[in-house]
Structures are given as structure tokens and as C-alpha cells.
Amino acid sequence: MRTLFASAVGLALFLVSLPVTGQQSTVSTVEPNTVYVDYNCRVLTATHPSKANPAPPPRYRRNSVVCHIDYSNQSVHRKKATIKGVQKTVYVTVNEREYLLQNTADQSVTFVVDYLLRKGWQVDSDPQPDEVKGSVATFRVIAQPGQIVRLHVGSHS
């Protein structure tokens, strides 16, 4: 059973050397020992060229061994804010998500998680993302062989 999981992660670690376009990901080049994960906890996997399509686009696939969303929560809070010099009560919506990332490889890997932000929303997370480009916040987490790491990500309106 472990061999099956290791081969699935091996495939994920093999990855592709093609850029990903669109808003889904900020991947531009693939780094060795890097596992790319999208907002929905899908792992970037290698695609194989064929005669009809020599450079197929990369694909994200579910792999619950490598990535699992432990919880996803949305809450609404009231807070006081000064708007145009007037003290008002405003409502803030907070989205939280916790990723469980497992390194099943025999070497350390860096997980790169792309978290989508809604228009006008801000990252509300500890740790802060490594970068934010447009509506994608990118987090990097290093995991040792066999290690499971938690990544808590949040955003608010």
C-alpha cells in the first residue's frame, strides 16, 4: 500500500516543466522537490506527451494522501470602524481553511499552495503568504520525509 502512495507522490514530484496559465496558479517554472497544490487541494501532476498533443497542459488531480482540507469555515463578525470620520459598526466576513500536507517522499519537499482571494478581500493569515499576485496568494511550506504539516490560510472582506 505504501508503494502505491509513494508512486503517486513520485508522480506528483516528477511534475511537469510546462508553465501553468490562467488565474488558477502562479506556477511559471517547476522547481525540483516541489509539490504544487491549488485552492481545492488538488496536486499538480505530470501529463504525458502523445503524438496528437506533444505538449499537454499540466493537470491538477485529487490526492487525499498528499493534501487534505482539514476544515473550511466562514464566519461573520461585527467590528467598529471609522468611515469618513464617522464611527460605524461594520460586518466582516472571514474565510478560513486548513490544509494538511503530507510528504510521502524519501526527501524533503516544498509545498506551494495557491489560495484564491475574492475581489476586494485581503489575506488574514499567520503565516502570511510568500507572495500575492492579483487574486492568488502563494504559500510555501517545507516538509521533511514522512512529515505532515498544517497550513492555516484565511481571508476577510
Image (cartoon, grey):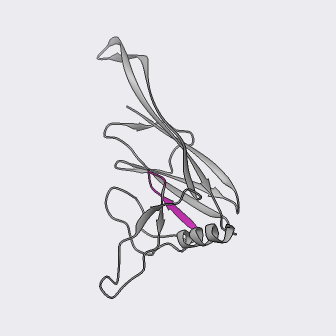
The x and y percentages for residue 93 are 40, 28
Quadrant of the drawing holding the C terminus = top left
Q: Does the segment drawn in magenta span residue 36?
A: yes
Left of 138 or right of it: where is 3? right
Relative to 37, is 79 above or below? above
* Image point (47%, 65%), residue name: 44
Quarter of the rendering occupied by the N terminus? bottom right
* Total marks in image: 0
Q: Residue 14: x and y, percent?
A: 54, 74
Residue 77 position by quadrant: top left
Q: Is residue 64 left or right of residue 121?
A: right
Q: Nearer the viewer, residue 153 or 80?
A: 153
Q: What is the magenta range?
A: 34-41
Q: Position of residue 121 (x, y in %)?
A: 37, 36
> Against 10, is 27 above or below?
above
Q: Residue furthest front?
A: 1
Q: Nearer the viewer, residue 129 or 11?
A: 11
| Residue 134 percent coordinates (x, y) | 34, 49
Task: Find the residue positioned furthest to the bottom.
Answer: 51
What's the residue at 64%, 50% (across, down)?
149
Q: Residue at x 65, y 64 (%)?
A: 104
Query: Is 20 within the magenta?
Result: no
At 35% across and 72% down in the image, what residue appears?
Answer: 57
